[in-house]
Image (cartoon, rainbow, N blue to C red):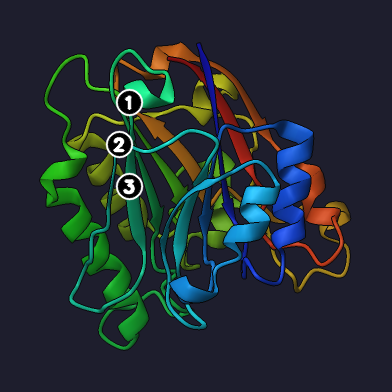
């Protein structure tokens, strides 16, 4: 049975809820994972989500900043939220889909919004960058991200705010000292990935040496012409689930939708 999961840093869900509807209509994902929703839970546009075909919602938000949500056509068995660095930030939410959702075995979806890290890649002078590195360290040792059973079925998606590969940025040499592609960030993300034996599903479809972007800055006068992008958004899966991925789409055209986010959705279909 196919299960299609979309991940998208929406950059304000209340401002761009109709774009969520456009994604739903054009790609029909079963589950939509959103980051940077920027709204407290009591103001999340749940009625609109239901109108688009997503009556089930797990939300973890806060006013004006951060925030993550999982919208689903199928019911959840459970919902959990994890905090990091004692900051009180809404940066993680996870759900389990099971028999009530039509699955023969449970499947866990983790949705993350890792801190951006500010502009200066020095933890001694930049508190935001120090927070980002500490967040990655805490996530790496969090046991919930270390599925032990060989048949464990988990997906980790979100705006991880790191472009780890040389082909994940428009210029490896020019961005080595730019937050999101510095060696220390790339190393820590690799540790997080290795600790859970997570498979980079997107790169199963696009070879590691080929350019692959999901974010283009608002600062570019013509983002498509300059194409100075980065792959900040990711889809990982456990070794048992990763081979079942059937299709992957980066919805590049969403960057040109009316009042767009600077990120675009990534849509992956698994055979569950």
Q: Residue 231, how many percent across, how many down?
A: 57, 47
Question: What's the distance in space between the residues labelled 1 and 2, CA to CA?
Answer: 6 Å
Q: In what element is the residue under mark 1? A: loop
Q: Residue 69, how many percent across, how many down?
A: 47, 56
- For residue 148, side relative to residue 244 (left or right): left
Q: Residue at x 72, y 64 (%)?
A: 16
Q: Are marks 1 and 2 in contact (CB under 8 Å)?
A: yes
Marks counted in the figure total 3
* Visible residue check, residue 127: yes
The residue tagged 2 is 77
User: Which mark is nearer the camera, 2 or 3?
Assistant: 2
- For residue 43, side relative to residue 237 (left or right): right
Question: What's the distance in space between the residues labelled 1 and 3, CA to CA?
Answer: 13 Å
Q: Are marks 1 and 3 in contact (CB under 8 Å)?
A: no
Task: Classify 10 Å Cα crowding around label 3: few (below 14), some (14-19), many (20 and above).
Answer: many
Q: Residue at x 23, y 59 (%)?
A: 82
Q: Nearer the viewer, residue 102 or 29?
A: 102
Q: Residue 109, how many percent across, how many down?
A: 36, 38
Question: What's the distance in space between the residues labelled 2 and 3, CA to CA?
Answer: 11 Å
Task: Classify 10 Å Cα crowding around label 1: few (below 14), some (14-19), many (20 and above).
Answer: some
Q: Earlier in the sequence, mark 2 or mark 3?
A: 2
The residue tagged 1 is 98
Q: Residue at x 23, y 66 (%)?
A: 83
Specify the label residue 116 is tagged with: none
Task: Classify 10 Å Cα crowding around label 2: few (below 14), some (14-19), many (20 and above).
Answer: some
Q: Reply above or below: 145 against 241.
A: below
User: Which mark is nearer the camera, 1 or 3?
Assistant: 1
Identity of the residue furthest to the bottom in this view:
125
Specify the label residue 94 is tagged with: 3
């Amino acid at each position: 049975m196919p299960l299609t999961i979309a991940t998208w840093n929406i950059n304000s869900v209340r401002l761009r809820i109709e774009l969520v509807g456009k994604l739903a209509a054009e790609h029909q994902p079963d589950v939509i994972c959103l980051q940077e929703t920027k709204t407290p839970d009591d103001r999340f546009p749940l009625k609109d989500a239901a109108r688009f075909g997503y009556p089930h919602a797990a939300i973890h938000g806060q006013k004006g900043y951060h925030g993550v949500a999982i919208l689903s056509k199928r019911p959840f068995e459970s919902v959990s939220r994890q905090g990091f660095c004692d900051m009180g930030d809404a940066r993680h939410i996870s759900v389990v889909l099971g028999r009530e959702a039509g699955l023969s075995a449970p499947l866990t979806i983790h949705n993350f919004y890792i801190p951006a890290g500010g502009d200066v890649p020095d933890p001694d002078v930049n508190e935001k960058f120090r927070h980002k590195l500490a967040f990655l360290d805490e996530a790496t040792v969090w046991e919930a991200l270390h599925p032990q059973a060989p048949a464990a079925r988990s997906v980790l998606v979100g705006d991880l705010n790191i472009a780890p590969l040389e082909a994940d940025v428009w210029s490896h040499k020019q961005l080595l000292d730019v937050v999101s592609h510095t060696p220390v960030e790339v190393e820590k993300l690799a540790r997080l990935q290795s600790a859970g034996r997570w498979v980079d599903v997107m790169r199963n479809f696009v070879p590691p040496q080929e350019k692959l972007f999901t974010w283009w800055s608002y600062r570019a006068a013509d983002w498509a012409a300059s194409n100075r992008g980065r792959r900040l958004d990711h889809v990982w899966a456990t070794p048992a689930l990763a081979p079942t991925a059937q299709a992957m789409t980066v919805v590049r055209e969403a960057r040109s939708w009316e009042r767009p986010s600077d990120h675009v959705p990534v849509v992956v279909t698994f055979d569950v």
